[in-house]
Image (cartoon, rainbow, N blue to C red):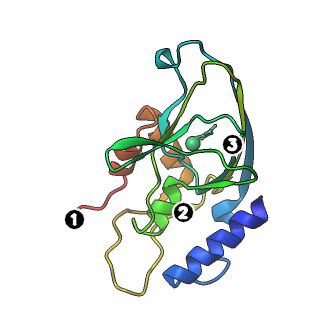
Amino acid sequence: MRKSLLRILDLICEGLGHEQGYFDDELSKTQLLSVNHHIPCPNPSLTLGMPEHSDPNLITMLHQCSVPGLQVFLNGQWMNVEPLPGALIVIPGLQLKVITNGKFSSPIHRVMTDSEEARTTIGTFLIPSHDMLIEPAKDGEGNPPVYRGYTYKEFFSTFTGSNCDADTALGCFKNKA
Ligand SMILES: O=C(O)CCC(=O)C(=O)O
Ligand SMILES: [Fe+2]
């Protein structure tokens, strides 16, 4: 999974004009594997499997099982991400948004519960090393950086301190327009 994500990141580099391997080392140092098990809820309107959030890391790969539940917030409404057999979902994280100076966005998503079936998913998260300086990569187009540099440690504590609200956390690292 790490190899596939690094390949995808290299394709992103190619598209944006950054050198190959830009994300290979400290920016993707840690790989976290997380298994989520959501038990059924007879009345799914009463609880969410996972509340709405953007992933705070660099990039995520998710294997959802055959039970639906993942939703993404798109054009002002929640859309179901239907499970496809054998498909893996790639979710750009907030660090990818910052490093690409906002060219990539990090989608808000959440998990609904199912009334009858349990849902087990596996996520792989690539995470920068804690002391790594994160900043928009120079894009050769002379666009001013939207965000100031920070360490991932600093970002993560701001993110958790703002109730995991992406806009609030990112707002703390925005340069004045
Ligand atoms: O279980 C899922 O479908 C999504 C999990 C997720 O969004 C996460 O772990 O960040
Ligand atoms: Fe997520």
Asked which secondary structure carries label 2, the reply is strand
Please provide percent x and percent y for residue 174: 32, 57
Q: Earlier in the sequence, mark 1 or mark 2?
A: 2
Q: Is residue 119 left or right of residue 168?
A: right
Q: Is residue 57 visible?
A: yes
According to the image, label 1 marks what residue? 177
Q: Is residue 25 visible?
A: no
Q: Earlier in the sequence, mark 3 or mark 1?
A: 3
Q: Nearer the viewer, mark 3 or mark 1?
A: 3
Residue at image coords 35%, 46%: 167
**Which labelled disc corresponds to residue 133?**
2
Few, some or many residues within 10 Å of mark 3 (<14, 14–19, 20+): many
Q: Which quadrant is the N terminus positioned in?
A: bottom right
Please provide percent x and percent y for residue 60: 63, 53
Between the C-alphas of marks 3 and 1, the distance is 39 Å
Q: Earlier in the sequence, mark 3 or mark 2?
A: 3
User: Which kind of residue does numbered mark 3 sit on?
Assistant: Gln
Residue at image coords 24%, 61%: 176
User: Which kind of residue does numbered mark 1 sit on?
Assistant: Ala
Q: Nearer the viewer, mark 3 or mark 2?
A: 3
Q: Contact, CB < 8 Å: mark 1 with mark 2?
A: no
Beta carbon of the mark 3 residue lies under 8 A of ligand 1: yes
According to the image, label 3 marks what residue? 64
Few, some or many residues within 10 Å of mark 2 (<14, 14–19, 20+): some
Asked which secondary structure carries label 1, the reply is loop
